[in-house]
Amino acid sequence: MSSNTIALTELPASRPLALRLHEWVTTVDHKRLGILYILFALVFLAVGGVEATIMRLQLIGPHKDLVSPEVFNRMFTMHGTTMIFFVAMPLVFGFANYLVPLMIGARDMAFPRLNAFSFWMSALGGIFLYFSFLGGDGLYGAGSAPDVGWFAYAPLTSKTFSLGHSTDYWTLSLLSSGIGSIGTAINIITTILCLRCPGMTLGKMPLLVWLNLVMAALVILAVSPLSAAQIMLLIDRYLGAHFFDTQAGGSAVVWMHFFWIFGHPEVYVLVLPAFGFASEIIPVFSRKAMFGYPVMVLATIAIGFIGMSVWAHHMFTVGMSAGANTFFVLSTMAIAVPTGIKIFNWMATMWGGKIRFDVPMMFCVAFLFQFLVAGLTGVTLAVAPFDWQLGNSYYVVAHFHYVIVGGILFTAFGAFYYWFPKVYGKMLNETLGILHFWLFFIGFHLTFDFMHIPGLLGMPRRIYTYEPGRGWDTWNLIVTVGVAFQAAGILFFACNLIWSYLRGKTSGNDPWDAWTLEWSISSPPPVYNYAVVPVVRSRRPLWDLKHPEDPDWRYE
Amino acid sequence: MTPTNIFAPASTPADSIFGLSIFVLLNVAAIFIVVFALLAYVVVRFRSKRNDDRKEPAQIYGSTQVELAWTVIPVLIVLALFLASARVIASIQNPPRPPGALEVIVTGHQYWWEYRYPSLNIVSANELHVPVSDPAHPTPTFLTLLSADTLHSFWVPRLAGKTDLIPNHPNHMWIDPHEPGLFLGQCAQYCGTQHAKMLLRVYVQPRDEFDRWVREQQQTPQSAALSPGQRTFESMACGNCHTISGTPARGRFGPDLTHIMSRDTIAAGAAPNTPQKLRLWIKNPDAVKPGSKMPAMGLPDQDVDAVAAYLETLR
């Protein structure tokens, strides 16, 4: 036997549990790390959901005292931090990890060990954040979980206003998960640039891969300043610097710039992979090639560039000059153009197709309608004077939940139903899936459609209770009722995952009659992915295979 | 009617925002209707039929003309919205300053508002009094916004958009209310535990009524003899945080109480200024506003009564 032959002998089917868990902890396989990322995200989705539910119960009517103001403030801080850093980011990285190598015909990510390191750094971040419930009291006996809000504006984070260690755990948490994010971003970029199979030029990559490439570039650009700011905050708190310590001449506004130069590109970090899911699912279920592929790529790159220059629209109310406000109005509105182009191209892809409404497509169609609304309320917020009224009100809260839940989470659910058969070789149950969709859809609209209205009526965000007689009561009641439907939807989703994993219908390798490379190999894919490295000639290699009389490469 | 509706403007900045917002909303609604209708049409029209022949539909890879159309039209809409916004930004941020303008320095504290009228030599808290501004002879009020601790934001939706109060970073805004009345709002930037009960009340008064209020606020109350309540107030460190003009109490950490009885509310609008609530507030501030910076001094009941009785003389 020569030394470069890889032994592919099957491992014995039943191994001790401890051994199997050990394999998961020490794995460097991109598919297992992808699954770990996604499981991690699902656990925190449940935790963040409980925190949101506590807030909504408190706000069901005026002057309720289910929880104290201190607890409420911790809940919105933990909810925001958890959902962004420990649900949305790991979901995005989990799917990227699992799918990108499969879609470009690679056997793994470029740096498998960096991949494992990055995942465990992110996991450590989640542990830091939640350890604050135990360790946040510190020696001062004040604190517990952080209560500074997820964007932690100075000077609330200074020693003067944040006693104990809650803010420190928040900082360490973001620092640690930030290192993980940057590591994974470097890995994704390198994988895409260096490991594509023969024939797959940049112009023939699946759109999901393109979107993840731009996403990873944005992660490096956006998370770096955030990490820098966290280090500065630590130096402020422990080494006596005064970057953000306003009582010693520091600047609260500098923190805002640092945070939002991360915070706004972060929105695109999350939404671009969601666009990726939609760009794979919509063509397959419309039975048509993606309309305007080059334009979709250009629009993605444009969103990446413009997305780096809009951050201060989060700061229209901090007293910037008229010139600065005007600039950020223009840059923010400009981003509506490439985003609009994307919606039109998805619509054109469906036009003239034969649309199959399986569960993945139901989620993606709902996404199109909801993202339209989210984009348009985004335009209203981009108008700086209008933002002086709407900013920091419940209208903003409704808007960004429309983006993150109505856009990103809906397509992510679609992605679960679409790729679960590839990951486990079993279909997710359709009946449970339809129940999941409709319950979550109704809950989403009850909660987030009606949440815009109290904002228009002057209700600011982050208040643990409100005065009666402001016309906010009924709207808040409806918003809270929606939570029950969303929770029921999530419950059906969880049952579906577990039930289908155990006894789902066998799916075969290509249940959706799809066109990208991952559907050409067995489900679940073998550890090495591709026994023979594939060669592609078009953006839809499996279409070429299935329609040798009319292959795509003649038209591209 | 909702007292904090952004679509019921009563002052020029709120009014110009209202006009712009209607223009923006009409545009956005038109786009919504067109795109929603197209999407709905596609979803209904092109769903696969039950007795489908399973043949793949015609594959179309793109069209330059169509792409150009749905690029150029949005660009034009964006330009229109941008120009409209730029005009309103300039008109609100660079206003004319007529000679009759009133200056007020607003300082945000955890969790209350301090108002200083430098030209009138008045210090007040939580309830802002300003004169009505007749559009023919405008007497706007210009606010300089400061913060003593964390961030806050001044938001009275019917009068103007919000502007943040940031330590080391003075901000400016202005209002010119066209009608008298009470206008409500509240702090709109998370500032700590009791952010929710940092309420704003702006009393817009006709000129003569406002002038009368000014004269009352300018008076220093004269008390003949030291009452038991005043003695307790001055000996129990109350004066370290509160000012009462004409007495040794000169603290600036809490609201100025010189004319506390001229106010309708206490604790930044969290409770009505009734004798009962005032006693409760002195005895146990957390019962009125948990997390407020006012400490419970542990006074025996008769001292609480005496201090309350003293405060009730401060008109």
Image (cartoon, rainbow, N blue to C red):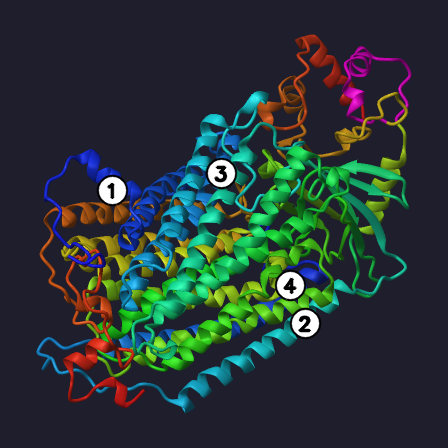
Looking at the rendered structure, whether the residues under marks 1 and 2 are on a common chain is answered as no
Q: Which mark identifies residue A62? A: 3
| A331, A259: nearer the viewer | A259
Task: Identify the residue at horizontal 40%, vertical 61% (top origin).
Answer: A188
Q: Chain of mark 2?
A: B
Q: Is residue A329 visible?
A: yes
Real-space CA distance between mark 4 and mark 2, rounded to the nearest whole angstrom: 9 Å
| Type of amino acid under label 1 | Glu
Q: Is residue B223 magenta?
A: yes
Q: Point out the tag, 3 or 4, that comes first from the N-terminus.
A: 3
Q: Give the residue furthest to the front.
A: A2
Real-space CA distance between mark 1 and mark 2, rounded to the nearest whole angstrom: 59 Å
* B118 versus A544 height, above or below: above
Real-space CA distance between mark 2 and mark 3, rounded to the nearest whole angstrom: 38 Å
Looking at the rendered structure, whether the residues under marks 3 and 4 are on a common chain is answered as yes
Q: Indicate the position of residue A240 as horizontal and vertical percent values.
A: 71, 35
Whether tag 3 and tag 4 are in contact, CB under 8 A, the answer is: no
Q: Chain of mark 1?
A: A
Q: Point out the tag, 3 or 1, that comes first from the N-terminus.
A: 1
Specify the segment rendered in magenta.
B221-244
Q: Chain of mark 3?
A: A
User: Could you say which quadrant of the image residue A442 lies in?
Assistant: bottom left
- Mark 3 residue element: loop
| A362, B5: nearer the viewer | A362
Looking at the rendered structure, whether the residues under marks 4 and 2 are on a common chain is answered as no
Which dot, 3 or 4, sits closer to the camera? Answer: 4
Determine crowd level at label 2: few under 14, some 14-19, many 20+ residues with C-alpha closer than 10 A. Answer: many
- Mark 1 residue element: helix
Q: Is residue A392 visible?
A: no
Residue linked to disc 2: B86
Which dot, 2 or 3, sits closer to the camera? Answer: 2
